[in-house]
Image (cartoon, helix red, strand yellow):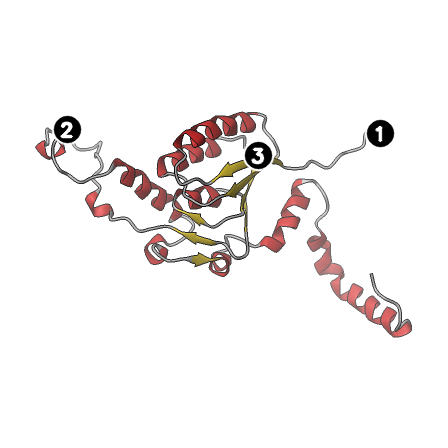
Amino acid sequence: MKTRHKQEPRHFQLKILAYGNSYYVDRLARLESALARKPRLLQIDMVGVGEIPADSALLIRSVLVRRNANTQIITNARSSLQGGSVLIWLLGDTRIIRDDARVYFRPVDVSEIKETDETVPWKEDKSLYWDSPTGIDPEEGDYARVLQLINEYLPVKELAGRLIEVPVLRQFGLVENEKVDQFLAAAFGKPSEAAGGSQNSSEEKSNRRKSKSLKPRQVEK
């Protein structure tokens, strides 16, 4: 009879750097390689002071959304998050964040960002010449897309420009660290303590009270 061993999640470190485009290109390739092994659980540990650039965040997202359907992602934020880093953290099936960490994303004026409309025939627009001072930054377009995706989890219009603390994230149902053990237990195929706890809780409490009354000096372990 074969013994079934507990499967631990694979860990993948993702540093949050102020300037690290080449680093994220390398990590992207390693992330693709890690997901190609089709792990049951992959935990992305996010740590560092800085911000994942919008383009890198969108690239990482494109890899995560194409993963095997049986692979569950845990995003573990050990540092505060901002900008594109917030999006990566939100993509986790289960999210963990340090209790005193904060989340921040700055607002962006989307009215200045013009996107092509495939339903409208193309016509020459002199205002789009490279030598025209349009003031449009392509990176801002990527950042606006990041905010659109964050808005699927958090109301960007109301929260942009504010420091968001963990209690607020709990209110939106994005993090509940005490449920992580239950998630891991289910993923490992172990019976959930919470599942049977609701049915037997009153009986167990009654038994504990009786035990205490009969043996007042006995320490309950």
**CA distance for labels 1 and 3:** 27 Å
Residue assigned mark 2: 122
Above/below status of 102 relative to 6: below
Image quadrant occupied by the C terminus? bottom right
* Residue that carries the numbered disc 3 in the rendered image: 71
Nearer-the-camera pick, 44 or 67: 44
Disc nearer the start of the sequence (1/2): 1
Mark found first going from the N terminus, 3 or 2: 3
Quarter holding the N terminus?
A: top right
Mark 2: which secondary structure? loop
Residue 90 lies left or right of residue 214; in this view the side is left
Of callouts 1 and 3, which one flags the residue occurring earlier in the amino acid sequence?
A: 1
Is 201 on the left-hand or right-hand side of 162? right
Q: Would you call the spot at circle 2 few (<14 residues within 10 Å), some (14-19), or many (20 or more)?
A: few
Please give the residue where the numbered disc 1 appears in the rendered image: 1
How many angstroms separate mark 1 from mark 2 (CA)?
A: 68 Å
| SS at mark 3 in the image | loop
The answer to whether 201 is drawn above or below residue 64 in the figure is below
Amino acid type, callout 2: Trp
Residue 197 horizontal/vertical position (percent): 72, 58
At 30% across and 43% down in the image, what residue appears? Answer: 144
Circle 1 SS class:
loop
